[in-house]
Image (spheres, rainbow, N blue to C red):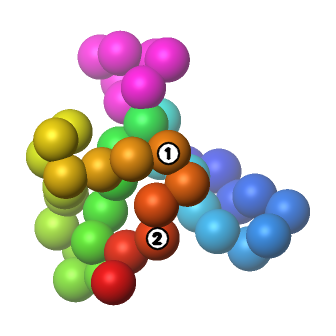
Amino acid sequence: ERLECNNYNTYRSKKYPEMYVALQRSGQYKTGTKTGPGQKAI
């Protein structure tokens, strides 16, 4: 977990360090096909 300068948290994958984990507002993870760069959870 890392707190970015815009007050968002980012979560990096342990298994694939170059990848990030996308979370929904409910805390559930998103599948790769449902995410995109810079996408905000709705």
The picture places residue 30, in percent across and down from the top left corner, at 19, 55
Q: Which mark is residue 40?
A: 2
Above or below, 28 relative to 22? below
Q: Residue at x 42, y 26 (%)?
A: 19
Report whether 42 appears left or right of 26: right
Q: Pointer 1: residues within 10 angstroms few (<14), some, or many (20+)?
A: few
The picture places residue 34, in percent across and down from the top left corner, at 19, 52
CB-based contact (under 8 Å), mark 2 and mark 1: no
Q: Which region shows up in magenta?
A: 13-19
The picture places residue 39, in percent across and down from the top left corner, at 46, 61
Q: Pointer 2: residues within 10 angstroms few (<14), some, or many (20+)?
A: few
Q: Secondary structure at mark 2?
A: loop
Q: Which mark is residue 27?
A: none
Q: Secondary structure at mark 1?
A: loop
Report whether 1 appears left or right of 13: right
The picture places residue 9, in percent across and down from the top left corner, at 59, 62
Amino acid type of the residue tagged 2 in the rendering:
Lys
What whole-number distance in Å separates the C-alpha atoms at marks 2 and 1? 9 Å
Above or below, 33 relative to 29? above
Furthest-right residue in this view? 5
Membership of 5 in magenta stretch: no
Amino acid type of the residue tagged 1 in the rendering:
Pro
Membership of 18 in magenta stretch: yes
Q: Quadrant of residue 41?
A: bottom left
Report whether 11 appears left or right of 9: left
Above or below, 11 relative to 28? above
Main secondary structure of the magenta stretch: loop
Above or below, 31 relative to 20? below
Q: Residue at x 16, y 41 (%)?
A: 33
Q: Which mark is residue 37?
A: 1
**Where's the C terminus, which quadrant?**
bottom left
Q: Residue at x 70, y 60 (%)?
A: 3
